[in-house]
Image (cartoon, rainbow, N blue to C red):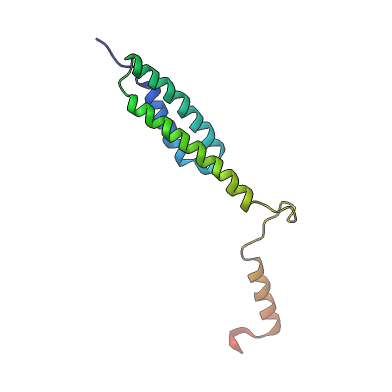
Amino acid sequence: MWRPNNAQGTAALVLGIVGLVLFFSIVFGIVLGTLAIIFGALGRGKARRGEANNGGAALAGIITGIVACAASAAMIFVYAVTGVDEDDEGERDEPYGSTALVRAQVLAEGSVGGA
């Protein structure tokens, strides 16, 4: 009895989906997306030769792999634009740092409670 070898197509689809979910981490998106493209191409080849019957899943793996790689590449630019400035020397501003300073000044002046 003939059994199809659908492993590559299924692996491509799973890797592509996980790559899409983890695209913001850049490394996982690019690595998993690339693997999805490779396994998808192998799965499509097996489907063309009649060794597998999930050519659609392999194609979906290729597409999701490409999208994961593209989204991760876009995140490189997002991180570059919103990243650390050269003037900060690797330190990020605290989101509530200035609020604590204002509260300390208000307490020092004695104008708490609208007085």
Q: Residue furthest front?
A: 48
**In which quadrant of the rendered view does residue 63 lie?**
top left
Q: Residue furthest bottom?
A: 115
Q: Residue at x 63, y 48 (%)?
A: 80
Residue 78 percent coordinates (x, y): 58, 49
Q: Residue furthest top?
A: 1
Q: Nearer the viewer, residue 111 or 14?
A: 14
Does 17 appear above or below 98? above
Q: Nearer the viewer, residue 79 or 66?
A: 66
Q: Residue at x 65, y 75 (%)?
A: 103
Which quadrant is home to the C terminus? bottom right
Does 82 appear above or below 11? below
Residue 52 percent coordinates (x, y): 33, 18
Residue 88 percent coordinates (x, y): 73, 56
Residue 29 percent coordinates (x, y): 51, 37
Q: Nearer the viewer, residue 110 or 51?
A: 51
Does 21 appear above or below 99? above
Left or right of 103, for residue 88: right
Q: Residue at x 38, y 24 (%)?
A: 9
Which quadrant is home to the N terminus? top left
Q: How many marks?
A: 0
Left or right of 18, for residue 80: right
Q: Residue at x 71, y 51 (%)?
A: 90
Left or right of 56, for residue 39: right
